[in-house]
Amino acid sequence: MDESQISLGVPGRLGPDLPGPFAVGRYANKLKDWMRERPRVLLIGEVTGVGRSKVQAYFELRDGDGAVPCAIWLNDLERAGLPEGALRDGAEVVIAGGLDYYPGGGAASANFCFRATHVRLAGEGDLMARLEALRTQLRGEGLFELQKQLARPVLPKTIGVVTAEGGAARRDLLAGLGRRGWGGTVVWAFAPVQDRHAAPKIARALQDLAARPEVEAIVVTRGGGSLADLWAFCDETLCRTVAMLRVPVISAVGHERDSTLIDDVAAVSCSTPTHAAEAAVPLDCGAARVEVRRMATSLRRGADGAIAARARHLGALARGPARALQRQRTVLNQKTREIRAASERGIAERAATQRRIAGLVLERARRRALGQVERATDDGRRHRAALDTAAERALARRRETLRKALVALRAHDPERTLERGYALAETPDGEPLTTADAATAAGRFSLRFRDGRIDARTARDDDV
């Protein structure tokens, strides 16, 4: 809408700085015109919620990613030339048309829809295009390789089967397993195999079988049909479920010319239920039993021949035990003589060797003793010379000590004192008088000089 359109003129602004406010009726009509100007396109999907009014039919067109409400005028529907009841829930259709919007009014509600002008049932080409797009998507995500990496047992004990309860595929599969001579257990998970609700129920049945620890392989099978009939086995959710299972899944949907998306994600794709029985049980049990019986007969014959040969050999051995014993005795006697002679030679050689060794040891001991005596003699000479030198040094030291002592003694000799002019007072008995009191007490004493002795006495006061 441009600025020339009429505004209600409500004062003030409400919220962001936007144009308006505008009258809702005029805006609704502009919206209707804008939608009807959008390009016309083709849509493909599944019809659901079909209803009719006096002038139009309405329904929703759905697929796994979304839905669009649709409507078609009854006149346009009649011109489409569809069979009676073809526009029903679950039908795959292609419609042509574009967006439409009914503005409503004071007494009617607004309504949006995709206004179809042409409608036809979806053909093989439409479904193949959708199938190839989904196949490309799943291949790009690596879902085609997960199941093929699982190890399949050669002789499973328990096989799970997802199929219709009363279908011919069930009978064909059992017949194929019977021809293989397989005697294991089949766990059935019956589910619808052709309608819009089949894919979720098949996926649920697969998950239930995979949850059972005894199930080692799962077969999904049904008879042939058109691509529309087999479309449940091209469901994206079902294919993702198969790719993520821990148990290998064997697909046997349709005939040889039929190709569904579950064939690509399964571990093995089979053209018929009989082929699926061979893939589920790779080992032909009947042929294996025949081979085992043949090999058992061969083993029995071989065992009988071996026993006969051993018996003949034992008989030959039983006829000559005495000769064999005599030969062994002769050999034993010869060995005994050789051992005795070898022992005597060994003892003599060891005795001679020991004598030589003893002589060498004694000679080496004598030489060592002589060497020790010579070394002791040399040590004695060195010690005597050292003692002589030490004695001379000690004698010289003693002489020097005596000389010094003599000098000191002569320094303290009284005779030396007398030689310097001093006299020594002695009692008549020769005892020295060292004090005046001692001389007074002695009365008479002698004075010894260097060159002689004279007698003396102490003078008293009365003698004076």
Image (cartoon, rainbow, N blue to C red):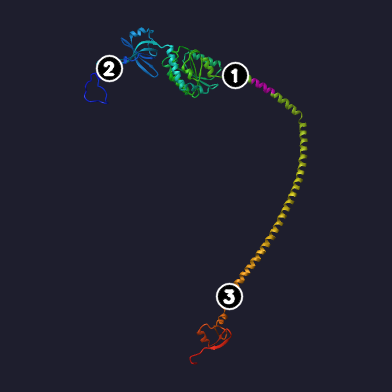
According to the picture, the residue beneath numbered tag 2 turns out to be: 28
Q: Residues within 10 Å of mark 2 (few under 14, many from 20)?
A: some
Q: Which residue is pictured at 35% across the width and 7% down the height?
A: 79
Find residue 114 and name its label.
none
In x, y percent, where is residue 280?
53, 19
Q: Main SS of the magenta segment?
A: helix
Residue pointed to by mark 1: 289
In the rendered image, which residue does mark 3 sit on?
A: 407
Question: Is residue 23 positioned above or below 334 on the image?
Answer: above
The verdict on residue 304 being magenta is yes
Q: Nearer the viewer, residue 153 or 356?
A: 356
Residue 396 image position (x, y, % from top left): 62, 69
Q: Residue at x 53, y 17 (%)?
A: 277
- Magenta segment: 296-305
Tell me the CA gap for discs 1 and 2: 81 Å
Check the picture and name the quadrant holding the N terminus. Answer: top left
Q: Is residue 364 visible?
A: yes
Q: Quadrant of residue 297?
A: top right
Identified at 61% across, 70% down, the residue is: 398
Q: Hey, what amino acid is under mark 3?
A: Val
Residue 44 falls in image quadrant: top left
Front residue of 99 and 146? 99
Sequence order check, earlier mark of 3 and 1: 1
Q: Earlier in the sequence, mark 3 or mark 2?
A: 2
Q: Position of residue 25 (x, y in %)?
A: 25, 17
- Disc 3, SS: helix
Q: Residues within 10 Å of mark 3 (few under 14, many from 20)?
A: few
